[in-house]
Amino acid sequence: MKKIVIVGGVAGGASAAARIRRLDEQAQIVMFEKGPHVSFSNCSLPFYLSGVVTDSKKLVMMNPNSFEAKYNIDARVNSEVVTINRDKKLVTVKNVVTGESYEEAYDVLILSPGASPIVPKLEGVELPHVFTVRNVVDIEKLHNAIVEKDAKNIAVIGGGFIGVEVAENLRLAGRNVSLVEFAPQILTPFDDDMVQILHKEMMDHGVDLVVGDGLALINEQAITLNSGKVIDADIVVLAIGVRPETTLAVETNLEIGETGAIAVNQNYQTSDRNIYAVGDAIEVYHRLMNKKTRLALAGPAQKQARAIADHIYGIPNQNRGVIGSSSIQVFDLAAASTGLNERTAKQLDIPTEAVYVIAPDKVGLMPSSNPLHFKLIYEVPTGRILGAQAIGKGNADKRVDVIATLISMGGTIEDLKDLELSYSPMFSTAKDVSNMAALVASNIMAGRFKQVRVDEVRGLVESGAVIIDVREPNEFANGALKGAINIPLGEIRTRMNEIPKDVPVYVHCRSSQRSYNAVMALENSGYDNVYNISGSFLGISLYEYFNDQQLGREPIVTSYNFK
């Protein structure tokens, strides 16, 4: 009979315990959790603040009695493993309620301690109205404090997934919310040209979004930023990020990797082969970066847990590394990403190109049809797909999951171009946006036309470049790039004499599809100086809006158009 001890009872630990039981009915499984709950949905914690999750008890998926009755797993809460004796294969466990300690033997030990919130060493972080969010107890304390104080103004520090979700749910609950992010943008998996859509969405729903500025100090009623800006705050939520919980591993002299997380091999064994580690506390291999990284996501943690259980019982496991797929709801928009963003790919010196396509998420005749913004990143000259990002009211996650699958299989833009996907007017278009992106990418790769990006357009406008807008006159009248010339697509062939051949000419429409047709008509008529503006006027409006509001700069459009 094997005795398996697990430290940590949430995603990684609980998943490993359940899989071990399915493989071995005789094993003795003991799982320790230092908090009062095991197997809770930590990804759902912010939704309690808005009432989407109506009762905090619903966040707890299993309790110790259920583990015992259904799986014969001994789950002990309020039990902190404080030391490991590797030579004797013993752990020392402290009951955090009574303070009593005892020893527990193991044959195999699995570490799943997770990650802890980063709390900066700044004045005021110890004040009672400052909170972090890690578990059910944390979210209950935060919720209760907001209700008891009837807090009107809440500052959330950090624009990662937790920070954005906390800010969103507090806003849905009717609070005045400020979200402060030190970096130039929130949600770093998204590139600058895509994240501006989410910046605008936050602003449109009343969040006071501040980027490029950090927290300096906290006092009783407000926070002060590095810039000197003061923001009223009855409650402060620190969501700056997390660090792997490695205290036990360090004190046990287990190897810590280059990322600061626990080092593991391909089977998730630590430097002690009788001790495995899983989840947010370990470093993993990123198959696209070709290096070790940290990835605090529930999906990979559960897969790692299963692999550990399988390895204990001699079942082969193929560790293919991670690519980093994630999704998030930001008010009315779904946003998803996978693989590398363009920024990271270029930092890694991977020869990279990207295309940005805006297409309907379903057939335009359908009343629920909306634009879906889709960015595809690929390697040059191989066409190997490196990543994708999608944002819209429709199924952004579905499109990104298609790309994640292709990445895992080493797929290219040629594979994606011909990929046969399901179609119904209520779900997508016959040629899905992901197919469209691959077609655009293959055209760019083959040199059939040239493009410029939305982030290059301001420079073009300010330099007086020749810009042709091929939308209809009524569209042009509702908002246009300053200095642009309106030649509708239906008139492009009869008005070519107005378009110069001796200087670069930049063409756009609403979403780049009509302008692509105009560019090809011009190229096939002897023009070799024309460029399609990727994202076109809709993309430009979304890209420019937030920075114009934040920086107070002069817009490059006569009026924004977000439809």
Image (tube, rainbow, N blue to C red):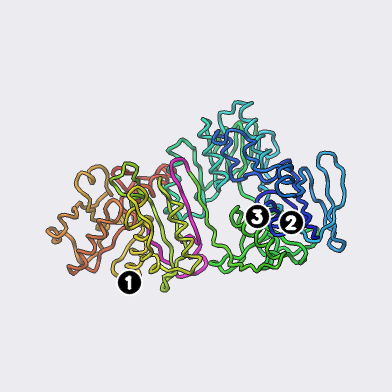
Relative image position of residue 510 (x, y in whole percent): 28, 50
Q: Which badge, 1 or 3, comes first in the chain's sequence?
A: 3
Measured in 3D between alpha carbons, the distance from the residue under mark 1 to the one under mark 3, in whole angstroms, is 42 Å
Query: Secondary structure beneath disc 3?
Result: helix
Identity of the residue drawn at 31% across and 65% down: 450
Residue type at the position of mark 3: Asp
**Viewer-side label of 1, 3:** 3
171 left or right, relative to 469: right
How many residues crowd mark 3 within 10 Å: few (<14), some (14–19), many (20+)?
A: many
Tell me the residue that label 1 is attached to: 446
Magenta stretch in the rendered image:
330-356
Q: In which quarter of the image is the N terminus?
A: bottom right
Q: Quadrant of the C terminus?
A: top left
Check contact, mark 2 vs mark 3: CB within 8 A.
Answer: no
Tell me the residue that label 3 is attached to: 280
Tell me the residue that label 2 is attached to: 25
Identity of the residue drawn at 42% across and 69% down: 412
Magenta span has 86?
no
483 left or right, relative to 94: left
Q: Which badge, 1 or 2, comes first in the chain's sequence?
A: 2
